Each structure stands twice: as C-alpha cells, then as structure tokens.
Image (cartoon, rainbow, N blue to C red):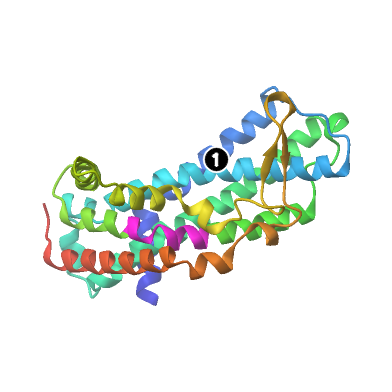
Amino acid sequence: MNNQIWLIRREFWENRAIWSIPAIIGVLLIIAGLFSRVNLPTLSSANDTHDFAAIFLVAIGMFFYLVMSVYATWYLLDCLHADRKDRSILFWKSLPLSDTETVLSKLIVAIVVIPAVYFVAADVTALIVAFVVSIRLRSLIGDALWHPDVWLQIQVLWVYVIVTTAIWYLPIAGWLMLVSAWAKRAVILWATLPPLVLCIIERYFGSHVLWNVLRERLFGLPAASLRASGPHSWNVSGTGDDSTLHLPSSVWHFINAGEFFTNPQTLIGAAVGVLLIIGAIQLRMRRSEI
C-alpha cells in the first residue's frame, strides 16, 4: 500500500498536467465569468431557478469531463511507453518495485485520481463562477445558482459518474495500456489501427458485430448508467424556440445503479479489461528501453 502511494505521487511529479490542465481551465472559466457578456433566460418560478442551477452545474461538470476524457486517454497511451523511451525504466526496475505495482498505480491514476482531480476542480470553479455571476447579475437571477439540494445531488452524480466511467471503460484503459507497454513508436496509430482494420474487414463480409461492440463501449455509458427515458430522466419537449428541458426531481431517480452493475455488458467488459491489464503487466515485465 505504501508503495502504491509513492508510485501515485511519482505520477504527480512526472505529469504536472494532471493538475495544471484543470487549474488552467478553471481560471479561464472564472475570467469568462468576470468579464464576458452573460445572457440568461427569464426565471419566473422556483422550478425555473432550480433547473437553471442544475443546468449550470452540469454544464461546467460536463466541460471538465470531456477534457478529462481526452487527457486520460493520452495518459494511458503514454504511461508505459514514455519511461521506456527516456530509459527511466532502467532506474525504476532497479528499485524493489514490481511491474504489477507500477502498472496498477498508473491505472489507478488514470481511472480514479485524474477524475477525482477534475471533480474537485469543477466543483471549485462552479462555486467561484456562481459567486461571480450572482454578484454581477444580482438583479436578474438573485440566488438562482444557490440551491443546496442541487449542489448535493451534483456531488452524488459526480461520484457515480467517476465510478461507472472507471468500470465501463476498463477494457478501453486495458487496451491502451497494453499498446503503451508493447509499441516502440506511433502509439496512437497502433491503438487505433488494429480495431479499425478489423471493423473494415468485418464490414467487407457484411457483418457489423465488432463495430457495434466498439460503438456501444465508446458511447453507451449514459444509456447504461442513467435513465434515458421516463418521468425521472432529463428530456426535452417541444421543438425549436418552444422546446423545454425537463429535469428529474432528484438525482436518485436519474441514476440507474442497479441495472448498470448487473448489466452483462458491464460485467463482461470489466472481465476483458482485467485480462488486458494482466497482458500489459506481462509485457511490462518483458519489455525494456526503446
């Protein structure tokens, strides 16, 4: 356990972008809140202010989540390749640390630590921006952004998203780490080309099974983990300027934990992810510097 803590600290020392990117994004959003022009809808009821606060918090959280997804993908592709490229692997292999510990520490950073850092950054940014906008437009929105129940529900939703994302994308993380441990160069190409070629070959024979599996794994998390329809989901009624966004009364109605954790896709994907990570550990044991 102590080794894992030090290995995770090592990742922070060697990858300052883990905390610097969300910090920069937060500063830019705060500056935008201070100086940009803000156009707000008319808030005429308590439900309107409640929904506006939820949309505001989710919008900031989703922006951080998208950036986090891109950075975490890059980190997984680079984490086992970079130290072979700069030959620091020789130093780390000379220490009393196993390759299993090293690979697992990098996996934990990618699927737990990085999302947690972005979660904290999104929370702090949302608080500051909400304060700034409330001061600037006090006469228009009053305390519309300050709903303790909404804030609490967003925290629950964030934690749920981090957990479900880590489990759902475990096979993707395992594949990226496997490629990172194997490839000598062009890591991005090796990560994307084999699945793409297999999908093209499969399409040539009139099948779409692999493509559907990949598409579901890449884009199917919201449908698998959240209620996509029904009275407790987020849905839009009407079209164009007359459209209205309806929000769930509680995040407990929105999340779909029971179905997600018992879904065969979730369980099979997690098993495949574990096998790929074991493969990455084995390659780590056998690979040396580039």
Residue 96: quadrant of the picture: bottom left
Of 163 and 33, nearer the camera is: 163
Residue 50: quadrant of the picture: top right
Residue shown at the point (34%, 61%) measured from the top left: 106
Q: Is residue 181 above or below residue 258?
A: above
> In which quadrant is the N terminus drawn?
bottom left
The magenta span reads 162-173
Tag 1 secondary structure: helix
Is residue 126 rendered to the left or right of residue 10?
right
Q: Amino acid at mark 1?
A: Phe
Residue lying furthest top in this view?
37
Residue shown at the point (18%, 60%) measured from the top left: 89
Is residue 66 rendered to the left or right of residue 126?
left
Instruction: Name the spot of residue 94 as percent of width and height, x first.
Output: 17, 69
Q: Is residue 226 visible?
A: yes
Of 75 and 96, nearer the camera is: 75
Query: Which residue, given by chain and number where applicable, does mark 1 sit on?
Result: 63
Instruction: Name the spot of residue 187 as percent of width and height, x first.
Output: 21, 45
Instruction: Name the spot of residue 105 as percent of width and height, x first.
Output: 35, 66
Of 189 and 136, nearer the camera is: 189
